[in-house]
Every structure is written in C-alpha cells, then in structure tokens.
C-alpha cells in the first residue's frame, strides 16, 4: 500500500521522464506504484546517472534510498562486472537500514531477472554469508562495514576475498552515521580492496558534513565530483514536526513519560509512537516496566535483542497501529517507519544531530508529526544546543492520567506512579543493574552534559534509587569502573568477579564476635578517603537482617546493623554533604588519621534509609576499614 503524502514533498518530475531502462520504469509503476519523484530523487537521480562521482546532502525519510538505488541498477546494467564479482557495493551504518535498502533494491529488480542483490550484516553466522556469496555472487551487495570486512578476511577462498576487485559502483549511505558509529577503520580497509577511484563511480550520501565526512570524501571519491544539496530543496524537519521539551526531576521521568504517551493516545486514536532511550539496557528496562505496568502494544528494539527478534518487531511496528516502540539509537538511523505520529526522546541525545535524526522518525514524507524531548533536570544544558530551533517548553502534566483507551490498564490510569514503581520492583535485578551501569557509562562520556565524575556518580545513584528500585547502587567490577574513568570516585560499589548484577545479600547483618561483625563484604564503599567502621551492619546494606551485637572494646566499633528494609545510601548529587548516622557514634566521621570513638547503640537507621527496626547495638569491636 502506498501512503498518501503531502504534495509539497513531491516534485513535478515523473520517473517516466528519466533516461532509465524500461524494466526499471515498469518496477516503479507496477511494484512501487510511484509516478512522481520526491524532491530529493528529482535532484539526485539525474546527477548520479551521469559519469561523475556524487556527494549528495540528503536527509532520511525523503526518498533517499531510491535516489541511489535507481542509478546504481542502471550503472550495473551498462557495465556489469565479470562473473563471480560484485558490480556494486552499498555500505550502510545499521542492519535495519541495510535490510530496508535491500527491500527497495529487490523490488526495483523485479523485471531484471538476470540481476541479483544480497544483504549481509552482523548477527547472522558469517559462514552462512560466505556460502551464499560462493553459491551465487550478487551483482549488488548491501552490507554493514563490519560484516563486509569479516567476509573479506575470514574466508580462505580466493573467490570470496576477491569479489570486490572489479566493483564498478560504491555507495556510502549516511556517511556521517557510518563515521559516528566508528566504522572508519573498516571503510578504509574496504576501500583498499576496491578498484582505484579512476575505475569506479562513488555516491556519498550524508545529512551533515562534519570534517570527518569531508576527509572520507577526499579518499573515497575522485578529486573532481558533483555536489547535490537535496536538503535545501526538502522541507526542514522543524517545519512539519511540532517540537516540545519537558524538564523534570529524575524521580518523575517515568511518570511524565507515561503522561505524555497517554495524552497523545487519547488525542490520536491511530497512534504510532517511538520512545528513544540513550542505551540498549535503559531501553530494555523501560520497555519491561511500562509493559508490566499495564501499557499495551509495547514493542522494543535494541542491540540486546537477537536479529530475528528485531526483524519481526520492526515488521510488526511498520505494519501496525496503536503501538509504542521503545528503541535505542539502532532504529533512529535511516529506517523508515510510515505513519509515526509521535516521538519521545527520553534522556539527552548524544548530540544535536542525533536529536534531529530521531525527531525525523515522525513527520515523514511531508506529513505532520510531534516530538517531545523529555529530560531530567541535570540534562537541561542540552537544550542550549537546540536554541535556534522552535521548541515549545512544556510544564509537567497533571495526574491521574486521562483515559488512553484500552491500551492502558485500570491500575495504570488510576495511579501511574504506583503502577510503574511496582513494575520496576518486579523487574529482574540484573536488568536494573545493567541499566544503572549503562547510565553511568553514557553520561560519563556525554559530549554536552559535562560535569564532574563525582556528580555523575551521584546522579546515577539517585537514578538507581528513584527510578530503578535500587536504594543500594548495584555493584560494579573494578575493571569496569576503571574503563569508565571513575576509579576512586566516591559512591560506587565495587564487587568481585561473578557478583556483579546480583542483589545485595538479604541478610547483611551478621552476629558480632570479639572484633565485631564483618558486615556485608560484597558491598564495600569505593571511597578510600572515607574510612568507615563496619561492625555488625555492613556498608550499603539493602535488606539487612537484625543487626548482630558488637564485640568487646576496641576502636572504631560501629552500631548494630539495621533490620528489615533499606540501609544507608551514598550522598545525593544535590548535597554531596557530610553523612551521618542517626543514633550511635563513630559512624561516618571525617577521616584524618584519628581513631573513631567507641561504637554506639544500634537503634538508629542509616542516613536516608527507610524506617525499620534497628538492630541490637553493641560495644565497640575493632572496626574493619574498607
């Protein structure tokens, strides 16, 4: 089915007017049901049909794929490589986009029975790809750079490793995203396996042209090439997408996201919504929580899902209505999902370009759409990167929810905060721990939200407590902390190999002996500057049992561990203030080389802890220092 598009998206140019083969025109008319070109196609196809290399500035969702597929097919028809060699190579940044290009190419080849196309990408057994290449070498190979290079290097068959030596056409689709995703080394190696620029034609398509894209163009294209600016002739994203932003405290992010979804679902009966999260693990956590809380029609696509799962989910979302897709950036790059009515970006995108790419999933093909950027308060600086765009600032939406139809369960409508909180608590602890770790890694390296490591950790710990039902920060391996550049930062919990992604012990308090209880040895505070005594109650205990009695005199004895419920937590991002223990002495005193005072009664609770029965106090045992 061909969806109607806004007339301003189309040009007056007809495909029948191009100097292309009759069978290509037939496929356009009978298979794709296209008569008129999009503005991008009208600007790009005539130039690509010529002899020059072409740099085309073109955005996704504008008919860009056919803008290079049609000329590529015509070039192969006119100058086919020898048998067993690939005539044209198309490099795509993602599996999903590669599959979409293959779909369009396959349709265009309907009446070209002698031509064959193939798509290869990661997530599929490379040996399967190798067998397919040997049995029937494609005329047009569509590939992600990583898998293309795998094929070139993992085969000992000269017939495979040399398949690109006669390639006539090279297409670099979404060159800016190819480089953003770190494919420059693979692309450079692939270029070395291709004929020199004088013996092939190259099309480079990109929405933006930062310096690294220009550098790639210098080595991939002939010095003399044509340039097409199809963006200038297209309708700018902000002209047909109603954009807004909403900044809320971290604790309100999930509830306000639910409010945004419910509001749109009530206003748009045939809604199709995409929710973008910063990482795959956060995407998985949010999808699980919202589905469990009672939101119907949830689909998730991210790199932690198998390729077969992602293929089915993508097809279901493309064909369906009244669906909500939770996605990481894997679905933001070039994939065309028709009829998306609303995009929510939950969390700061990596940069301005990513924001625009994601916003472009709605308002496709000239149709109107809506996009909201939902940020936690610490992410507010990202809005400075969008200051020149017309973005309306929203106020937090009121509760309870407006009815969103059958897609919202009654408990979710009645009390969304409670429903979401229960859903998160029910979620597998490993999922929550992975979400926490990915939050740390993402924001530690964020190019826009630059803040001190101590604040990033404090933000992550608050996020874990307020959104992930982890009052105790999940444990991390020391090597993981080191790779993140967070070694020695206060507030992290370091665990041994095999103990990561596991909840704290349910019985953290242990009985005292001559030197006091050992506490929970798995969860030692990663802070060499704060020398905290540890007696019967362990550091960062979550569901500590009844505290044991401290041992006989000595220095640094702490109070008994708190029973039942959450124990102490690291300092908040807002405060980063001196911690203290309610009841008892000698807990969390500033270090400075002097011995701590004797242990006090264990009747108090850990600071910021939840109420609960205090453990039995004890005399000061020897306080073990982390």
Image (cartoon, rainbow, N blue to C red):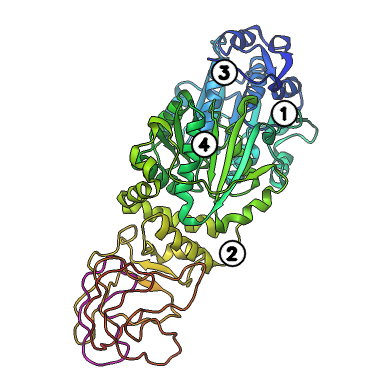
545 falls in the magenta region? yes
Q: Distance between the residues labelled 2 and 1?
A: 38 Å
Residue 217 position, x and y percent, is 72, 39
Mark 4 and mark 3 in contact (Cβ < 8 Å)? no
Label 2 Cα neighbours within 10 Å, binned few <14 / some 14-19 / many ≥20: few
Task: Give the number of the disc on residue 601.
Answer: none
User: Magenta residues: mostly which secondary structure?
Assistant: loop
Q: First in sequence: mark 2 or mark 3?
A: 3
Q: Is residue 461 visible?
A: yes
Residue 582 position, x and y percent, is 35, 79
Quadrant location of the C terminus in the rendered image: bottom left
Instruction: Tell me where residue 139 sits by quadrant.
Output: top right
Residue at label 3? 3
Where 261 falls versus 279 (above or below)?
above
The magenta-colored residue range is 535-558
Label 1 Cα neighbours within 10 Å, binned few <14 / some 14-19 / many ≥20: some
Helix, strand or loop under label 2: loop
Helix, strand or loop under label 3: loop
- For the point 21% across and 87% down, which residue is it? 551
Q: Distance between the residues labelled 4 and 1?
A: 22 Å
Residue at label 2? 451
Label 4 Cα neighbours within 10 Å, binned few <14 / some 14-19 / many ≥20: many
Residue at label 1? 234
Mark 1 and mark 2 in contact (Cβ < 8 Å)? no
Q: First in sequence: mark 3 or mark 4?
A: 3
Q: Which of marks 3 and 4 is in front?
A: 3
Residue at label 4? 331
Q: How far apart are marks 3 and 4 (CA)?
A: 21 Å
């Amino acid at each position: 089915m061909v969806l109607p598009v806004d007339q301003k998206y189309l040009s007056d140019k007809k495909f029948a007017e191009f100097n292309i083969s009759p069978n290509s025109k037939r496929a356009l008319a009978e298979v794709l049901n296209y008569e008129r070109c999009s503005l991008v196609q009208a600007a790009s196809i005539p130039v690509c049909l010529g002899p020059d290399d072409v740099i085309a500035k073109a955005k996704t969702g504008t008919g860009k794929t056919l803008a290079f597929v049609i000329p590529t097919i015509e070039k192969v028809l006119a100058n086919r490589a020898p048998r067993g060699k690939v005539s044209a190579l198309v490099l795509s940044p993602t599996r999903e986009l590669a599959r979409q290009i293959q779909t369009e190419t396959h349709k265009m080849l309907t009446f070209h029975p002698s031509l064959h196309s193939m798509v290869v990408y990661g997530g599929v057994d490379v040996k399967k790809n190798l067998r397919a290449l040997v049995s029937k070498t494609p005329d047009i190979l569509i590939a992600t750079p990583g898998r293309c290079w795998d094929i070139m290097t993992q085969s000992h068959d000269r017939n495979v490793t040399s398949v690109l030596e006669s390639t006539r056409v090279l297409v670099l689709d979404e060159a800016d995203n190819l480089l953003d995703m770190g494919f420059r080394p693979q692309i450079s190696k692939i270029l070395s396996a291709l004929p020199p620029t004088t013996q092939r034609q190259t099309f480079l398509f990109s929405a933006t042209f930062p310096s690294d894209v220009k550098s790639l163009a210098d080595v991939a294209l002939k010095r003399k090439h044509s340039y097409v600016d199809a963006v200038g002739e297209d309708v700018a994203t902000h002209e047909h997408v109603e954009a807004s932003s909403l900044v809320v405290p971290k604790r309100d992010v999930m509830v306000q996201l639910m409010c945004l979804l419910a509001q749109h679902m009530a206003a748009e009966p045939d809604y199709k919504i995409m929710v973008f999260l910063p990482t795959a693990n956060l995407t998985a956590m949010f999808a699980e929580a919202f589905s469990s809380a009672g939101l119907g029609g949830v689909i998730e696509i991210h790199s932690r899902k198998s390729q077969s799962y992602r293929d089915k989910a993508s097809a279901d979302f493309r064909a369906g209505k009244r669906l909500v897709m939770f996605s990481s950036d894997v679905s933001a790059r070039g994939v065309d999902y028709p009829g998306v009515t609303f995009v929510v970006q939950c969390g700061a995108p990596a940069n301005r370009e990513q924001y625009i790419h994601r916003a472009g999933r709605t308002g496709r093909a000239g149709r109107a759409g809506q996009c909201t950027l939902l940020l936690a308060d610490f992410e507010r600086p990202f809005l400075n990167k969008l200051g020149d765009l017309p973005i309306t600032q929203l106020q937090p939406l009121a509760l309870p929810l407006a009815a969103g139809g059958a897609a919202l369960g009654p408990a979710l409508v009645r009390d969304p905060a409670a429903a979401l909180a229960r859903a998160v608590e029910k979620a597998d602890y490993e999922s929550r721990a992975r979400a926490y770790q990915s939050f740390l890694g993402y924001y530690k390296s964020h190019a826009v939200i630059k803040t001190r490591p101590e604040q990033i950790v404090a933000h992550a710990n608050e996020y874990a407590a307020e959104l992930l039902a982890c009052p105790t920060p999940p444990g991390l391996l020391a090597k993981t902390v080191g790779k993140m550049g967070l070694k020695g930062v206060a507030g992290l919990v370091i665990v041994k190999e095999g103990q990561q992604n596991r909840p704290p012990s349910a019985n953290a308090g242990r009985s005292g002996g001559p030197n006091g209880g050992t506490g929970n040895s798995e969860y030692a505070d990663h802070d060499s500057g704060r020398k905290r005594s540890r007696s019967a109650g362990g550091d960062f205990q979550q569901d500590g049992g009844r505290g044991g009695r401290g041992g006989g005199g000595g220095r640094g004895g702490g109070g008994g561990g708190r029973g039942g419920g959450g124990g102490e937590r690291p300092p908040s991002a807002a405060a980063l203030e001196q911690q203290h223990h309610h009841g008892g002495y000698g807990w969390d005193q500033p270090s400075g080389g002097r011995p701590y005072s004797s242990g006090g009664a264990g009747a108090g609770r850990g600071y910021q802890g939840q109420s609960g029965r205090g453990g039995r106090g004890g005399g000061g045992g020897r306080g073990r220092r982390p």
